[in-house]
C-alpha cells in the first residue's frame, strides 16, 4: 500500500522567512498530489493540487513542487507570517495509485510554527 | 454558503452504546467520505460513497456502519463493536465523477467523540 512520510516534528520558522515542508512517498507514483492546511479542532482545507506532469505550482505565497523521480513533493510558504502556523497535510490519490479504494491517502502532517 | 455540516461538535457516550454522527452537504457533490483522525496519526478512511444507495468500506471499516439514502447526507454509526471509538471524525465530499477524480476534498469541521 502507499506510504506517505511527512516530518512529524514541529517546524519552527522565523517570521518573514521561507518555510519548506517535505512529503515523501513510496510504492506507486500518484497521478496527482494535494496539500491541505488543518487548524486545531477544524477540518482540513484544500490548498494546492499538482499533477504528475507538472513540476511546480504556485498560488500567492505558496509553491509546490513534485519530483516523481525522487518520489517527493516540497511545499513552500514564502514571507511566512504567524497566521501561517498550522498543520499541513500531504495527500495522494488512492484509486489511481493502485490502492483499489476511492479517496485520498494522507500523511500525518507537519506542524508549522511561525515565530514573530 | 455551500459547505459540509457535521453535528454535534462534541459527543459523549458510554461504552456499549451505538452513536450516529451526522454529515450533511449542500455542495451537490456525488462522493462522500468518512475519515478518523487520532493524535499523531494521519487521517484514516472508514467508509466512502460515490453515489446514492451505494457505499464501500475503507481501510478501517470494522465497527462502523453508514447509509446513503440521500445525496446530501451520509451519517456514520459507531457501533459497540468498535474497540477504540474515541477519536476525531471528519466527513468530506467532492465531485465524484470519473472525469474529476483529482478534485479536492471539502471537509466538515469534525465531531469529537469520547466514549467512556
Image (tube, coloured by chain):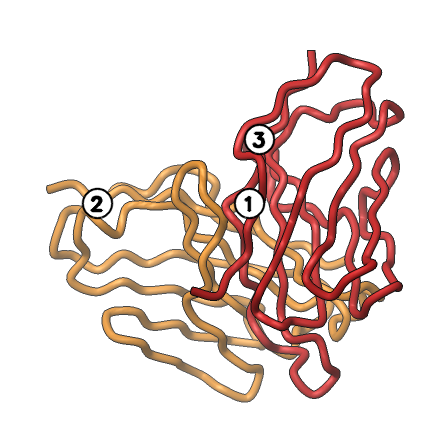
Quarter of the image with the C terminus of chain A in it: top left
- In the rendered view, tell whether residue B27 sits above or below residue A80: below
Picture residue at 73% right of the left edge, 69% below the top: A28
Query: Residue A114 at what x, y percent from top left?
Result: 21, 45
Asked if both marks, 3 and 1, belong to the same chain, the answer given is: no
The color chain B is rendered in: red
| Element class at badge 2 | strand
Residue under pointer 2: A114
Residue under pointer 3: B112
Query: Residue B97 at what x, y percent from top left?
Result: 73, 81
Q: Is residue A17 left or right of residue B61?
A: left
- In the rendered view, tell whether residue A69 sits above or below residue B99: above
Marks 3/2: CA distance?
A: 27 Å
Query: Residue A39 at what x, y percent from top left?
Result: 39, 44
Picture residue at 73% right of the left edge, 50% below the top: B45
Asked if both marks, 3 and 2, belong to the same chain, the answer given is: no
Give the number of the disc on residue A108: 1
Amino acid at each position: 500500500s502507499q506510504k506517505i512520510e511527512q516530518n512529524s516534528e514541529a517546524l519552527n520558522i522565523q517570521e518573514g522567512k521561507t518555510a519548506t515542508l517535505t512529503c515523501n512517498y513510496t510504492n506507486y507514483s500518484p497521478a496527482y498530489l494535494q496539500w491541505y492546511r488543518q487548524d486545531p479542532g477544524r477540518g482540513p482545507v484544500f490548498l494546492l493540487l499538482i499533477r504528475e506532469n507538472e513540476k511546480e505550482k504556485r498560488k500567492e505565497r505558496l509553491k509546490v513542487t513534485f519530483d516523481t523521480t525522487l518520489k517527493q513533493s516540497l511545499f513552500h510558504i514564502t514571507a511566512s507570517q504567524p497566521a501561517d502556523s498550522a498543520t499541513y497535510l500531504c495527500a495522494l490519490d488512492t484509486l489511481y495509485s493502485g490502492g483499489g479504494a476511492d479517496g485520498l491517502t494522507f500523511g500525518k502532517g507537519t506542524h508549522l510554527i511561525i515565530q514573530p | 454558503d455551500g459547505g459540509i455540516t457535521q453535528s454535534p461538535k462534541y459527543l459523549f457516550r458510554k461504552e456499549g452504546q451505538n452513536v450516529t454522527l451526522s454529515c450533511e452537504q449542500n455542495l451537490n457533490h456525488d462522493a462522500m467520505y468518512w475519515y478518523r483522525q487520532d493524535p499523531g496519526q494521519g487521517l484514516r478512511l472508514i467508509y466512502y460513497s460515490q453515489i446514492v444507495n451505494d457505499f464501500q468500506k475503507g481501510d478501517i471499516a470494522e465497527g462502523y456502519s453508514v447509509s446513503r439514502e440521500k445525496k446530501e447526507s451520509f451519517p456514520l454509526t459507531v457501533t459497540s463493536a468498535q474497540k477504540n471509538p474515541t477519536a476525531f471524525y471528519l466527513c468530506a465530499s467532492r465531485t465524484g465523477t470519473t472525469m474529476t477524480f483529482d478534485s479536492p476534498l471539502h471537509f466538515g469541521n469534525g465531531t469529537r467523540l469520547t466514549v467512556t
